[in-house]
Amino acid sequence: MRKRHWAMKIVAVETCVVALPFDMGGPKPAFAGRPWDNLEILVVKVETEDGLVGWGEAFGHAAIPATKAAIDTIIAPLMLGRDAGDIQGLSRTILHSLHLLGRNGSFVYGYSGIEIALWDLLGKRAGLPLYRLLGGRDRGPIDGYASLLAYNDNPLVAKNTAAACAAGYRFIKLHELTRAAVLAAQQAPGAADAAIMLDVNCAWSPVVAREMAASLADDGLMWLEEPVWPPEDVHGLASVRAYGIPISAGENVAGLFGFKSLIEAEAIDIAQPSVTKIGGVQEMIRVFDLCEAHGVEVAPHSPYFGPGFVATLHIIAARMEKPMIEVLWLDMEANPFDPWVRGQNGRFPVPQGPGLGCDPDLEVLERYRTGDWARNVWQANR
Ligand SMILES: [Mg+2]
């Protein structure tokens, strides 16, 4: 039998930013102190010596200029000439090379985007969709949960909750700070049988978080997300669990060992790893394994609009007991990764093509691209 040639050198790593106009059913919030006028995707493209191309997405939002610089100037040059299929080895050596620059933040986000593209390449080379590569089966379309952005206006919370329910969502997450907002959502037309979650993005001290958890205890929340500042305060977070609301956290955690700390402190019921932040697909799988061994549920964080969202779909299909994906509640003018990032009746089919199965529409990508492509190209004789 002829030996198949699996080793393929990485010959180019490219990045660009796509900015998509959107409507969220209310005034747009600031994000990290900046106006949030467009949805931005930091697109990562990795090419191997045989011309195969993989697509990834790195976090994201207001961090994009920093993450892009980390990839273009530091991480991409480290990837060139390496074996694209050696994902375990690359995660070990590249993240070790970068660890002095931060174990959470732009460098790990940047590597995450590249790692996702490496899985896309591996799946394409193997002729298998990512969920199959991870040992999963076809689960059919995945339920979305509508993640409403912050309105700080209870009539708008009610209006958008009703609209999401009318669009087919049965699970609604609020980014609000008051019990009144929770009640507004629960009393919205069509929301009687919808499950409501509340995400406060680390807004409260442990004392305030406990007071709020006590006041929300009888409201039937599906979970209360990141109630405590700072996110590293695992014992403060653990103290909020006493009020009986399932507690979720993890989008701001540094890797597997961050989740180990949360679990050892008995701080969470639900872990929320984020594929474009945590180090990519492999680190997500390690978190799933860790949580499984400790009886902790996993519900990934995925407010993305490109390959990061689709990678999450595949991981959920392969590993989540009751599959459900986070979807920001908004309407995009267009997206190069359509139709995979836009559900039907609140459900999201998992692409069946090899790899991520979501190669972009290049015409749409170029139409909404802002700034130039950044290219790092391997030169064999350097
Ligand atoms: Mg969150």
Image (spheres, rainbow, N blue to C red):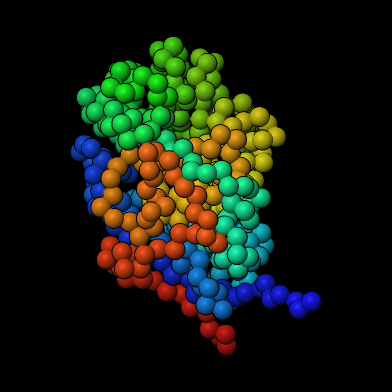
**Vertical placement of 64 versus 316: above or below?**
below
Q: Is residue 324 visible?
A: yes
In this picture, residue 43 sits left or right of residue 278: left
Q: Nearer the viewer, residue 29 or 339?
A: 339
Q: Residue at x 50, y 33 (%)?
A: 249
| Quarter location, residue 364 | bottom left
**Vertical placement of 40 versus 216: above or below?**
below
Looking at this view, name the residue that lies furthest to the bottom.
Answer: 381
How many discs appear? 0
In this picture, residue 241 sits left or right of residue 217: right
Q: Is residue 284 visible?
A: no
Looking at this view, name the residue that lies furthest to the right.
Answer: 1
**Image location (x, y in percent) of residue 187:** 30, 18
Q: Residue at x 39, y 38 (%)?
A: 346
Q: Nearer the viewer, residue 367 or 95?
A: 367
Q: Residue at x 59, y 51 (%)?
A: 131
Q: Residue at x 75, y 76 (%)?
A: 3
Q: Nearer the viewer, residue 92 or 324?
A: 324
**Image location (x, y in percent) of residue 36:** 26, 47
Classify the position of the N terminus by image quarter: bottom right
In this picture, residue 44 sits left or right of residue 36: right
Classify the position of the C terminus by image quarter: bottom right
